[in-house]
Image (cartoon, grey):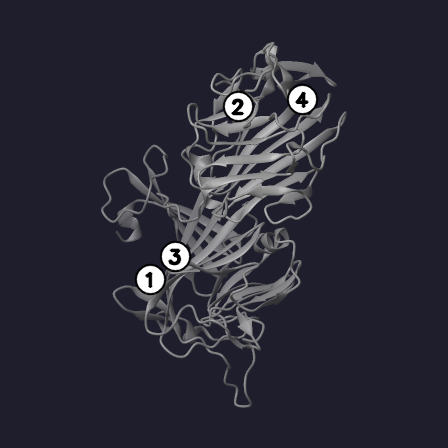
Amino acid sequence: MMGLVSLGAWGSQTVTLDLSTVDEGFTQQFADRALNVATCTSKIGSPALAIPNPFKDLTFDSIEIAFEVYNYDVPHVLGALISVYDSVLGRMYFTNGSYLGYNATGGWFDANLKNYALDHDFIGLNQWKNVKLRFSNAGYSVWIADTLAYKSGSTNVTMNGNLSDYTQMLSFFRNAGIVAFGTGSWWSDNQDANGNYYDIQYSYLKNIRFTKNDSLVKWIDALSLSPAFTVAIEDTSAVLDVAKLVSKRDAPALAIANPFKGLSVDTAEIAFDVYNYGDLKVLGTLFSIYTVGNNGRLYFSNGSYLGYNAIGGWFDANLVNYGIDRDFLGKYRWNRVRIQFNAGGYAVYVNGALAFDASSNNVNKAGNLTDYTNVLTFLSSADTLAFGTGSWWSDNQDPEGNYYDIQHSYLKNISFSFVEKQDTIIDAVPTVSIIGNSGIKKIEYYSITGVKMQGEFSAFRPGVYIKVTYFKNGTRQAIKVVKPREYGY
């Protein structure tokens, strides 16, 4: 179980808007304070209420914008509850008519908009609903009351647009200037002859949160493995020789603890460079994930075959009559392979190009698995990741004890990464307060020894200090460290 090296910890960071600092003209007091979006109606070029984009200049694999909304009048689909806006790059916005719009870097889309009017109303009137807008390299999704309303590619709502590369969308979020309230849709600046705005959003918002999620990456350092399992080639760097690892699945020659065990993930990826130096053997395996003593398993062979037989059912992808269907790897050259899993299925990429996925018809497939969340569950529960053994057939031997389908392949740059489920509760939630319409302050808590404290404190004990960082127009203006009583506690 040696050779697993972590390069960077999982990072999920959330900032929460502190509405108690917003001018009372923009808010409504219930049991707790809420933003009255109708009072924020304005031109996007000079918004009544805006903050610097919390995602600007950050690195992330996915983001979430979440809030609770209460519509106290008929929804107007072409306005904007909230928008992310940049005068050069474009805009993203969501309305109280459950419409998500994007017109910015890479293209545009309208989701849940029909003839410029309401398609499906997922929010309703006179009740609080929790909304989560999620964006990743794979697309977007809208969750209402913790239930999926629609996502990129859904057929239950009307969709239009030309954006296909969602990495461009994440690039927009990293570079846009502001987040605005009550303005920012494609139409929200429009006024009638008397100067009255159309599509005012008669809604309250509270618990407004912005979350970024980074992937965790773990690498296998071949130099830390036994020389019996490796070979030095090219620049004398050590690579894993899979043929040396042929063994029985429940007594593997080389195995590590499953890097995904115990994690709650939306997306998992296994990546590596592979060089096939002998005949391709489709029924063997380069690697596999399983629990010793349990038949469930997931594996991939140098014949470009991906197999799964575990929780929820089974599938064989790119296998025909127990032989090679399509060879995406060939021999005597290095190929970069990335195998991805999420709730929608699986995908295999070779040298950056999609070889096949769960919906492809370019390779032969068989199986009965329909709910791919079962694969994520399996990945988070299996114990072992092994090399050179673990396929459905890899234990088979001839009468002389020789294994069939040995993988004559080298592996290097082996990595495991994931994006965690965005419903995860985290301990540290810095508070970001709005200052007018152009500044924010970030509040953090530290012990007297400089250790960052978790959570927020209403009853301070001796030795706790508050760090207040002031920002304006996206630039840090000042930092102040004070004792609680100096900050009004």
Which of the two discs, 4 and 3, labels the residue nearer the N terminus?
A: 3
Which of the two discs, 2 and 1, labels the residue nearer the N terminus?
A: 1
Residue type, numbered disc 2:
Ala
For the residues labelled 2 and 3, the Cα–Cα distance comes to 37 Å
Relative side of 467 to 11, left or right:
left
Residue topped by disc 2? 386
Q: Determine contact: label 2, label 3, CB under 8 Å.
A: no
Residue topped by disc 1? 20
Residue type, numbered disc 3:
Asp
SS of the residue at dot 3?
loop
Mark 1 nearby-residue class (10 Å; few <14, some 14–19, many ≥20): some
Residue 482 in the image: above or below residue 76: above
Select label 3 or label 1 by which is in front: 3
For the residues labelled 1 and 4, the Cα–Cα distance comes to 59 Å
Which of the two discs, 2 and 3, labels the residue nearer the N terminus?
A: 3
SS of the residue at dot 1?
helix
Which of the two discs, 1 and 4, labels the residue nearer the N terminus?
A: 1
For the residues labelled 2 and 1, the Cα–Cα distance comes to 54 Å
Q: Seen from this angle, which residue lies furthest right?
A: 332
Image spot of residue 138 (x, y percent): 58, 50
For the residues labelled 4 and 2, the Cα–Cα distance comes to 15 Å
Q: Nearer the viewer, residue 452 or 65?
A: 65
Residue topped by disc 4? 410
